[in-house]
Image (tube, rainbow, N blue to C red):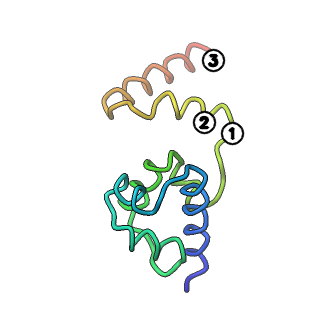
């Protein structure tokens, strides 16, 4: 088994169990099979970018966390939570506003 896949699988399992999600429930949220979730959690299978994204969304964590194990600081978590339901268009508008504020700030 691939050590990299095992580390990702352990993080997925940790967050799944921390949320009291069954594998079946997580699979439904992430549009994956529960058997695939099991194989990922034990490190037997790797993830495509799409599956990684779906699992991160379902677990409420970043893809970066699942891959590298680095959690966001509290400020980023707060902002991430505020923005999680925004559409791509809304996020682009927010990005423009932030850039403008930073330019004004100097």
Q: What residue occupies the far top of the structure in this picture?
A: 104
Q: Is residue 80 above or below residue 96?
A: below
Dot 2: within a 10 Å radius of its alpha carbon, few (fewer than 14), some, or many (20 or more) residues? some
Question: For the residues marked 2 and 1, what is the alpha-carbon distance in whole angstroms?
Answer: 6 Å
Residue shown at 38% from the left, 68% from the top: 34
Q: Are the two marked residues, 2 and 1, in contact with CB atoms closer than 8 angstroms?
A: yes
Residue shown at 56% from the left, 67% from the top: 8
Whole-percent x, y for residue 54 in the image: 39, 54
Whole-percent x, y for residue 69 in the image: 64, 58
Dot 3: within a 10 Å radius of its alpha carbon, few (fewer than 14), some, or many (20 or more) residues? few
Count of numbered circles on the image: 3
Question: For the residues marked 2 and 3, what is the alpha-carbon distance in whole angstroms?
Answer: 25 Å
Query: Disc 2 designates what residue?
Result: 77
| Callout 2 secondary element | helix
Q: Are the two marked residues, 1 and 3, in contact with CB atoms closer than 8 angstroms?
A: no
Comes first in the chain, label 1 or label 3: 1
Q: Is residue 57 above or below residue 23?
A: above
Query: Disc 3 designates what residue?
Result: 106
Q: Quadrant of residue 33?
A: bottom left
Most foreground residue, 31 or 91: 31
Q: Is residue 96 above or below residue 72?
A: above
Of badges 2 and 3, the one in the foreground is 2
Q: What residue occupies the far bottom of the structure in this picture?
A: 1
Residue shown at 65% from the left, 48% from the top: 71
Most foreground residue, 76 or 41: 41
Comes first in the chain, label 2 or label 3: 2
Quarter of the image that includes the C terminus: top right
Q: Which mark is residue 73?
A: 1
Q: Which mark is residue 84?
A: none
Most foreground residue, 104 or 29: 29
Residue shown at 56% from the left, 63% from the top: 13
């Amino acid at each position: 088994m691939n050590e990299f896949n095992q580390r990702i699988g352990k993080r997925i399992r940790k967050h799944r169990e921390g949320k009291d999600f069954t594998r079946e429930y997580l699979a439904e949220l992430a549009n994956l099979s529960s058997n695939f979730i099991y194989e990922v959690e034990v490190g037997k299978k790797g993830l495509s970018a799409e599956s990684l994204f779906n699992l991160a969304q379902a677990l409420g964590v970043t893809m970066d966390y699942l891959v590298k194990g680095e959690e966001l600081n509290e400020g980023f978590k707060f902002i991430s939570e505020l923005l999680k339901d925004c559409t791509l268009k809304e996020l682009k508008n927010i990005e423009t506003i932030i850039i403008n504020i930073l330019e004004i700030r100097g």
